Amino acid sequence: MNPLNHVAIIMDGNGRWGLKNENSRNAGHKAGLKTVEKIIKESIKNNVKFLTLFAFSTENWKRPKKEISFLFNLLEDFLKNKIDDLNKQNIKLKIIGIKNFSTRLNKLLNISEKKTSKNTKIQINLALNYGSKSELVNAFKNLIKNNDKINEKNLSKHLQTKNIPDPDILIRTGDKKRLSNFLLWQLAYSEIFFEKKLWPDFNENDYNKIIKKFRSIKRNFGKI
Ligand code: IPE
Ligand code: IPE
Ligand code: MG
């Protein structure tokens, strides 16, 4: 049975779910947040140590301003209401991506990270304004600036995911088979699961089925 340390998820399909069910993309984002809570709980039950959630990409700035501000307001409300609860559950929150939001949101994100930084049950990496290509370019720039030797180990140290093991599983919901600039380096050997369901419809049962399947896969890492 494969050990499972780190699950990464591209939470896609909120907009389509919202349009279909409530004639509003934003309603889908709201519903998607419920799935986030379910999957955090289920990850803890499965003793997953790192859960990385793709919430907003560097490319998502191309969306209408209204949708973007809805998303960030949703995040702000979520953190304000839930951070103490997450902290009580011994959950550590880390933001990966560039924090260049409003001063208010940047501050809230920093406070939330600091408050939960010593927690040990599970680490949630929330990918916000995250893009893998720019992460890699910055990592190379830093390697060169520090005059570090260019090798895999040193490059990994300059990524936002430093000190986090690579994902064992990548799940993408929403019936699209692409990576959308997510963790291109870190996913080199992950087991990838593309899920037809839209993120708000994804549930504990779907998640556990994937974990069960993962457990039984023969992971070769180049060996036989
Ligand atoms: C993913 O859902 C969430 C974010 C990118 C914030 P989408 O909003 O991309 O949903 P679809 O793909 O349009 O249905
Ligand atoms: C990927 O979803 C980003 C997140 C889930 C945050 P998108 O919906 O933005 O991806 P594309 O643009 O369809 O590839
Ligand atoms: Mg999408």
Image (tube, rainbow, N blue to C red):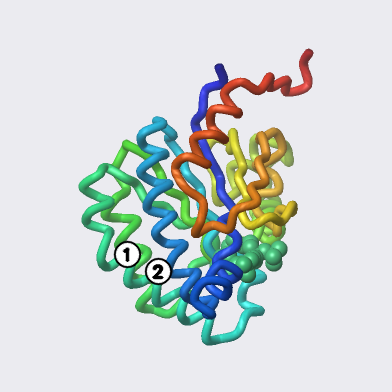
Instruction: Name the residue located 68 percent from the left edge and 61 percent from the top edge.
Output: 134
Q: Is residue 146 visible?
A: no
Q: Above or below — where is 76 with respect to 203?
A: below
Kindly indicate whether the residue at mark 1 contacts the one at mark 2 (C-beta within 8 angstroms).
yes
Image quarter for ligand 1 equals bottom right
Instruction: Name the residue located 69 percent from the left edge and 53 percent from the top edge.
Output: 136
Q: Is residue 201 visible?
A: yes
Type of amino acid at the residue the image marks with label 2 = Leu
Q: Above or below — where is 131 with respect to 218?
A: below
Q: Is mark 1 within 8 Å of ligand 1?
A: no
Disc number for residue 182: none
Which one is nearer the viewer's eye here, 134 or 3?
3
Q: Which of the 4 quarters of the picture holds residue 62?
A: bottom right
| Residue 24 image position (x, y, % from top left) | 52, 79
Instruction: Name the residue located 55 percent from the left edge and 66 percent from the top edge.
Output: 14
Instruction: Name the residue located 51 percent from the left edge and 36 percent from the top edge.
Output: 6
Question: Image check: 55 left or right of 72?
Answer: right
Q: Secondary structure at mark 2?
A: helix
Between the C-alphas of marks 2 and 1, the distance is 6 Å
| Residue 65 image position (x, y, % from top left) | 56, 86
Disc number for residue 75: 2
Question: Image check: 156 left or right of 47?
Answer: right
Q: Secondary structure at mark 1?
A: helix
Disc number for residue 79: 1
Outermost residue to the top: 224
